[in-house]
Image (cartoon, rainbow, N blue to C red):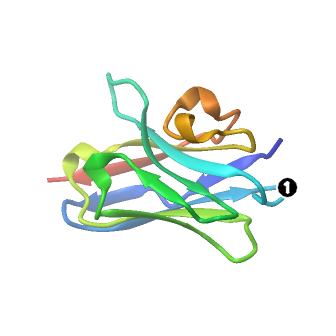
Amino acid sequence: QVDLVESGGGLVQAGGSLRLSCTSSGRTFNGYTVGWFRQAPGKDREFVATLRVNSQYDYYRDSVKGRFTISRDGAKKTVYLQMDNLKPEDAAVYYCAASNTVISSTLSSQRAYNNWGQGTQVTVSS
């Protein structure tokens, strides 16, 4: 079990950048997979990106490839989501999620993650 704290959301103009952070308040993310999901108003929550913390294998939804980068710090306590060239359609509440039992076929599935943060708002003005 890990307690997740997100930060870094805010208001940015289209084309701008933000970096979100997901920090474990207790144990490290050693052995965990940490993902980012987002939910826009009136829409279902959707997968954005995920990172195998130990191997640093990453995986993205198609619409953010080349614009978003997921990474971690050396202490394995924080996972980042660097978001560049933001578009209005990227606006949403972003959630980080973590699990130490995610298998490859479920990397993008919300059900695979059993620890969730409270979310951080990202607003993109056009």
Q: Position of residue 72 (x, y in %)?
A: 61, 68
| Residue at (21% x, 53% y) in the render | 87
Task: From this view, report whether residue 78 is shown above or below residue 75.
Answer: above
Q: Amino acid at mark 1?
A: Gly
Task: From this view, report whether residue 84 is shown above or below residue 102.
Answer: below
Question: From this viewpoint, which residue is outermost toward the bottom?
Answer: 74
Please name whichever residue, 9 or 48, is drawn nearer the observer in this view of the structure: 48
| Residue at (26% x, 48% y) in the render | 63
- Number of marks present in the image shown: 1
Please name whichever residue, 84 or 5, is drawn nearer the observer in this view of the structure: 84
Task: From this view, report whether residue 84 is shown above or below residue 10.
Answer: below
| Location of residue 111 (image quadrant) | top right
| Residue at (75% x, 44% y) in the render | 100
Q: Position of residue 125 (x, y in %)?
A: 20, 53
| Location of residue 89 (image quadrant) | top left
Q: Position of residue 74 (x, y in %)?
A: 70, 77
Which structural element holds mark 1? loop
Please name whichever residue, 120 or 69, is drawn nearer the observer in this view of the structure: 69
Residue marked by disc 1 = 26
Q: Position of residue 119 (x, y in %)?
A: 55, 42
Left or right relative to 84: residue 102: right
Please name whichever residue, 114 or 25, is drawn nearer the observer in this view of the structure: 114
| Residue at (64% x, 64% y) in the render | 55
Left or right relative to 7: residue 43: left
Q: Residues within 10 Å of mark 1 (few under 14, many from 20)?
A: few
Report the quarter where the N terminus lies: top right
